[in-house]
């Protein structure tokens, strides 16, 4: 009987400042859109785990909230998630935008890493958006960042266009240690269906009115019902804490919330490959009372 090939399994954390392309890279590496990608800064609010399996190797990638000054020093909720991801990982990727100067936030991060009393995993530098920079400037940027902190390896990529990503992925698969898999081969993320649907709707909202509505709005899937024909009925509430945001989400004659509902439903159907009836509520959260607008959208 042929011996079963040894399995390889590991975890990789993805760190970086806001809007450097972390979520785009995660989605590209697992070939599935699970992490929100919008024009609004810091749309990843908590650790998002993506899972990719190929041959005998399975990799879990953790997308962390974007670091923004003064995150490193004062925002304990974000900091706890970032450090938790680092400690959990076999190694971590620090993604930077090649066009941006080294910020105080990054310098603080480098100092925190150097001062850590815990044994840290290897750090890998990923210089993103290389299609917007000359080769000479990229080499100077790589040297500059590596002078501040000792990275085991440096990759230059364009997550948006896919340049260099295959080299990064090949290295990841070759480097992951031998271990039993943590998830089934078909798994692409560790989110519950409710959380996954929450993120689909939140992404549509942030894309639709990203310059106004705060990224910390909440979407809650409070009921899912499977029909006999295989379709899903999904009820969600969009929770905001300001009457102006509620009015903005609903829009004149309900046009905005209807557009959000249609596009969120289409994204859900594409991701789950099944028909969905989606019903959205916009809730103004108050201490004693809640105002509700209900919109049903189906086909």
Image: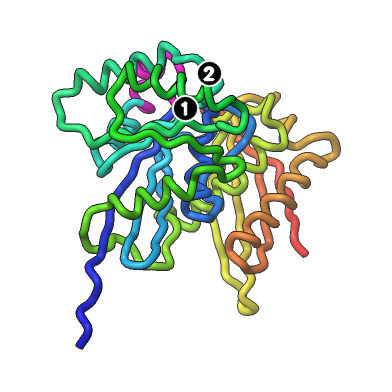
Neighbour class for label 1 at 10 Å: few (<14), some, many (≥20)?
Answer: many
Circle 1 sits on which residue? 96
| x then y, percent, for residue 113 | 25, 23
Look at the image and tell me in which quarter the N terminus lies.
bottom left
Residue 100, which numbered label? 2
Which stretch appears magenta? 64-78
148 horizontally vs 218: left or right: left
Label tally: 2
Q: Residue at x 73, y 54 (%)?
A: 296
Seen at 55% across and 48% down, the residue is 198
Residue 147 locus on image (x, y percent): 33, 17
Farthest residue to the bottom: give it. 1
Instruction: Please check the rendered image and state whether residue 106 is part of the magenta-colored stretch, yes or no.
Output: no
Residue neighbourhood size for the residue with mark 2, other residues' Cα within 10 Å, grouped as few (<14), some (14–19), many (≥20): few
Q: Is residue 54 above or below residue 33?
A: below
> Considering depth in this image, is 20 or 169 the residue closer to the camera?
169
SS under mark 2: loop
In terms of image quadrants, where is residue 119?
Answer: top left
Name the side, left or right, on which 299 lies relative to 93.
right
């Amino acid at each position: 009987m042929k011996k079963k090939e040894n399995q390889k399994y590991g975890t990789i954390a993805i760190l970086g400042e806001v809007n450097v392309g972390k979520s785009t890279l995660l989605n590209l590496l697992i070939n599935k859109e699970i992490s929100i990608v919008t024009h609004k800064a810091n749309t990843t609010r908590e650790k998002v785990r993506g899972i990719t399996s190929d041959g005998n190797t399975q990799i879990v990638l953790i997308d962390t909230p974007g670091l923004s000054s003064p995150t490193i020093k004062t925002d304990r909720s974000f900091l706890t998630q970032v450090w938790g991801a680092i400690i959990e990982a076999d190694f971590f990727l620090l993604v930077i935008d090649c066009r941006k100067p080294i910020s105080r936030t990054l310098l603080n991060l480098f100092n925190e890493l150097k001062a850590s009393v815990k044994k840290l995993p290897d750090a890998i530098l990923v210089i993103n958006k290389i299609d917007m920079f000359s080769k000479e400037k990229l080499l100077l940027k790589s040297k500059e960042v590596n002078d501040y902190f000792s990275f085991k390896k440096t990759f230059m990529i364009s997550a948006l266009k896919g340049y260099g990503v295959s080299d990064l992925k090949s290295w990841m698969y070759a480097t992951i240690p031998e271990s039993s898999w943590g998830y089934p081969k078909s798994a692409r993320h560790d989110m519950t269906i409710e959380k996954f649907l929450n993120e689909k709707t939140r992404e549509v909202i942030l894309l639709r009115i990203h310059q106004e509505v705060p990224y910390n709005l909440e979407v809650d899937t409070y009921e899912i019902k499977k029909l006999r024909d295989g379709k899903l009925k999904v009820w969600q509430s969009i929770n905001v804490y300001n009457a102006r945001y509620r009015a903005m989400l609903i829009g004149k004659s309900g046009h905005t919330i209807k557009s959000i509902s249609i596009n969120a439903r289409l994204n859900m159907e594409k991701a789950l490959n099944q028909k969905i009836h989606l019903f959205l509520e916009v809730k103004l959260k108050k201490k004693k009372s809640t105002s509700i607008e209900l919109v049903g959208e189906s086909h």
